[in-house]
Image (spheres, rainbow, N blue to C red):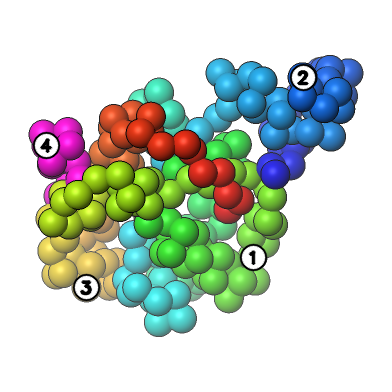
Amino acid sequence: MPTVPVHRLKKAEIVWLGTHSCKAHSHTYLEHYNCYLKDNPERERIGFLDIETSNLDADFGIMLSYCIKEFGKDKIYYRVITRNDLKKKLDKNVVKRCIEDIGLFDRVITYYGKRFDVPFIRTRALNLGLEFPNYGTLLHNDLYFLIRSKMKMSSNRLENACRVLLGKTHKTRIESSYWIRALQGNPRALNYILDHNKKDVIDLERLYLKVINFATRQDTSI
């Protein structure tokens, strides 16, 4: 159950939550914030999250970039690692900013994020001495498992799902040379990776809109 995001609410909004009750249980929305989101779905802030890393395991790799696209808007929150970061703090600034931006949302949507993106961010955060959102802080839905259970394709990768179900994908190819050069702080490589990352979250939102009504949304915590 998500907790009230008091860090991004105005005083008047907090007072309103404390003086209005949910329809199902007659508790205040401060007590049952999840009910508030259900009763007022138009107020829920949804973000589409994806990260790029140097390795599939967080004890051998670092975060190179992250993107969070705000649902229904052109706004994409992002940060990409810099050469200065690599020299001084590795991915600490990227991970810190990612966690801060995740906190702006009530729900995040990922693709295989339960098994990769979220555990990777959490591991890097703890390794770097950063606070990661506790269980129940915000909701998380992983579109990969809906695709795997409701569709029948040769590959359930995001790129293939978009190509088959949407007719095209915006994704660029994963060229290993860019990921290798990124660890040296190469600007061209970092720009390529960030562009790749942004296109992933754009595709993820498009796919979400296409398939979300084929299954009950399985809410879990980040």
Q: Disc 2 versus disc 1: distance between alpha carbons?
A: 38 Å
Q: Position of residue 204 (x, y in %)?
A: 31, 40
Span colored in magenta: 161-172
Q: Residues within 10 Å of mark 1 (few under 14, many from 20)?
A: some
- First of labels 4, 1 by sequence position: 1
Q: Name the residue nearer the viewer: 21 or 77.
A: 21
- The amino acid at mark 2 is Lys
User: Which residue is at 13% across, 41% downward?
Assistant: 164
Q: Disc 2 versus disc 4: distance between alpha carbons?
A: 42 Å
* Residue placed under numbered mark 2 in the picture: 23
Q: Residue furthest bottom?
A: 60
What secondary structure is found at the residue carrying circle 2? Answer: loop
User: Which residue is at 74% across, 42% downward?
Assistant: 3
What secondary structure is found at the residue carrying circle 3? Answer: helix
Q: Residue 165: which quarter of the image?
A: top left
What secondary structure is found at the residue carrying circle 4? Answer: loop
Q: Residues within 10 Å of mark 3 (few under 14, many from 20)?
A: few
Tell us which disc is closer to us: 2 or 4.
2
* Residue placed under numbered mark 1 in the picture: 130
- The amino acid at mark 1 is Leu
- The amino acid at mark 4 is Lys
Tell us which disc is closer to us: 3 or 4.
4
Residue 180, label in figure: 3
Q: Disc 4 versus disc 1: distance between alpha carbons?
A: 38 Å
